[in-house]
Image (cartoon, rainbow, N blue to C red):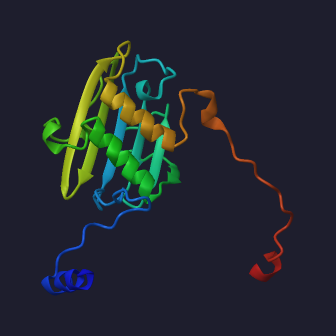
């Protein structure tokens, strides 16, 4: 009987269900768009002090489809400036970021703000502006949140920004920003004589 059922399935060409990950769960990266680009920019007005919380100070986070995460927090970057490279995320980590975007409602193009060009948005003197731009499946959409520097960020934006910042190893502490890597002196270049 088992052989008959297997033969019928082979002849009729039934599609197999998506491959399951170890443990029987669905593949976590199956739903991630291959062209996913996430761009988060936090602009601060000239009178806004540099305060500790990562979602409440100027910064920029950009995640590219290959997993390259560029990040900066506290630096005066504009929407045209790319921050430095922080790290490269794995496929599972990209899927995690995309899942959080879906949980907080940022992955839905219909919930975006129709603002035209987000690069033209400027904050007022006492204002913080958070611009979250997503690109996926050939579409591009933005969410823009304006608030006073004394107001807390909306929970959805704050959760998403803090999640991205944790992947970039950026914390609320401003002292952690300027840790230089230890450089070891290995002596003279042994190949210097061949480069003449």
Q: Does residue 108 appear in this view?
A: yes
Residue 89, above or below 45: below
Left or right side of 188 for 12 = left
x, y percent for residue 57:
44, 26
| The C terminus lies in quadrant | bottom right
- Please tell me how many numbered marks the rendered image carries: 0
Left or right side of 192 for 49 = left
x, y percent for residue 110:
13, 41
Query: Which residue extends farthest top?
Result: 150
Query: Which residue extends farthest front?
Result: 1
Residue drawn at (38%, 31%) of the image: 159
Residue drawn at (17%, 77%) of the image: 14
Residue 14, above or below 51: below
| The N terminus lies in quadrant | bottom left
Query: Which residue extends farthest right?
Result: 187
Residue drawn at (20%, 44%) of the image: 141
Nearer the observer, 13 or 67: 13
Residue 41, above or below 92: above
x, y percent for residue 40:
35, 40
Nearer the observer, 188 or 33: 33
Q: Does residue 132 appear in this view?
A: no
x, y percent for residue 70:
46, 48
Nearer the observer, 7 or 148: 7
Image quadrant assignment for residue 174: top right
Left or right side of 44 for 117 = left
Image quadrant assignment for residue 161: top left
């Amino acid at each position: 009987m088992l052989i008959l059922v297997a033969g019928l399935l082979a002849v009729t060409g039934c599609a197999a269900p998506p491959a399951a990950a170890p443990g029987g769960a669905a593949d976590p990266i199956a739903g991630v768009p291959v062209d996913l680009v996430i761009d988060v920019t936090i602009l601060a007005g000239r009178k806004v002090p540099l305060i500790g919380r990562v979602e409440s100070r100027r910064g920029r986070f950009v995640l590219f489809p290959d997993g390259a995460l560029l990040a900066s927090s506290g630096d005066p970057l504009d929407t045209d400036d790319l921050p430095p490279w922080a790290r490269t995320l794995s496929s599972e980590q990209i899927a995690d970021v995309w899942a959080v975007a879906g949980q907080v409602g940022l992955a839905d193009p219909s919930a975006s703000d129709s603002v035209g060009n987000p690069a033209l948005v400027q904050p007022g003197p006492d204002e913080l502006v958070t611009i979250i731009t997503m690109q996926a499946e050939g579409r591009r959409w933005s969410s823009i949140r304006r608030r006073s520097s004394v107001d807390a960020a909306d929970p959805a934006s704050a959760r998403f920004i803090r999640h991205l910042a944790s992947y970039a190893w950026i914390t609320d502490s401003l002292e952690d920003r300027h840790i230089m890597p230890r450089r070891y002196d290995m002596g003279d270049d042994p190949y210097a004589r061949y480069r003449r």
